[in-house]
Image (cartoon, grey):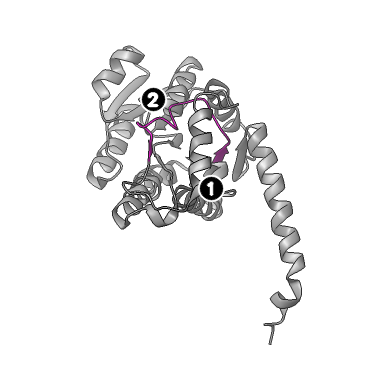
Amino acid sequence: MSSTTWFVTGASKGMGRHITDAALAAGHRVVATSRSPERLTDEVGSSDRFLAVPMALTDETEVAAAVHRAEEHFGGIDVLVNNAGYSVLGAVEEFSDAEVRANFDVNVLGLLSVIRAALPGMRRRRRGHILNLASISADVTGPSTGVYSATKAAVLMLTEALAEEISPLGLRATAVCPGGVRTDFLDSSSSRRPERTVDGYDSVRRVLDGLDRLNHRQGGDPALVARALLTLVEQPDPPTRLYLGSDALGAIRHQTARVRAEADRWAELTTSTDG
């Protein structure tokens, strides 16, 4: 693959850092966003193929400035990786309106801001692949993941519509849906719990306890996830959804079978509304 320019959000840790390192190791140019770009530059090392820029996803002015600086510095963005985001875990009833809005502001609206800022340049050049980090939680949810799953389901649907809209322009979009990956995803730095708890949600407490035990023991290797993304962007006809990890593959297969069975079971009532 020829050298390309990657724009990676949330690049200072977790998957963002692994993607940054993998792209640089493969000889690509990387613009990495971080709230501490100087520290990230110190950690990655000085290189004429690397640029760290400050960017807060909730500030459209900062988003536009970061994308403009990337385009000015390297001449354009070839691969946009919307990785930045965080999880909220708890019962739906427990979350305040402010907590839910804050999660959507980052995971969904922030992602949209970056896409809107990057698309004009991609359209002019008729070149670009947008990778939106969703999650298997976009398709499969349960106790404790309702709000987070809602944000990732929004990312998944936005990506599928976007892919169809930009395909005639020579551009591509893929929703990347990993299963469990050994990063800081479940640490307090990347995951939040509601400020209040509500009695009676024993199933939620059990799931949260299980997630605490699973932390840093997930089956997914972040370095292999990053490598998979490098392979993905080389494909002439990439998917609009890519599931990563055997756990994600098993979960989506089970979910699609369950939805199909339930739809068939209620088919008579479903079709009863046809006039």
Report if residue 111 is visible in the image: yes
Q: Which mark is residue 203?
A: 1
**Above or below — where is 255 with respect to 132?**
below
- Residue wearing tag 2: 13
Toward the viewer: 114 or 106?
106
Q: Is residue 93 left or right of residue 98?
A: right
**Above or below — where is 166 with respect to 209?**
below
| Image location of residue 134, percent across then percent down | 51, 43
Q: Which mark is residue 215?
A: none
Asked whether the residues under the numbered discs 1 and 2 touch, taking CB atoms below 8 Å apart as contact, a structural biologist would say: no
Residue occupying the point 52% across, 24% down: 222
Task: Indicate the secondary structure of the residue bearing disc 1.
Answer: helix
| Image location of residue 216, percent across then percent down | 50, 24
Q: Nearer the viewer, mark 1 or mark 2?
A: 1
Q: Earlier in the sequence, mark 1 or mark 2?
A: 2
Toward the viewer: 171 or 6?
6
Number of marks in picture: 2
Task: Indicate the secondary structure of the residue bearing disc 2.
Answer: loop
Residue occupying the point 59% across, 49% down: 139
Residue 67 occupies quadrant:
top left
Count neighbours of disc 2 (C-alpha within 10 A) and say few if under 14, some if 14 to 19, many if 20 or more: some
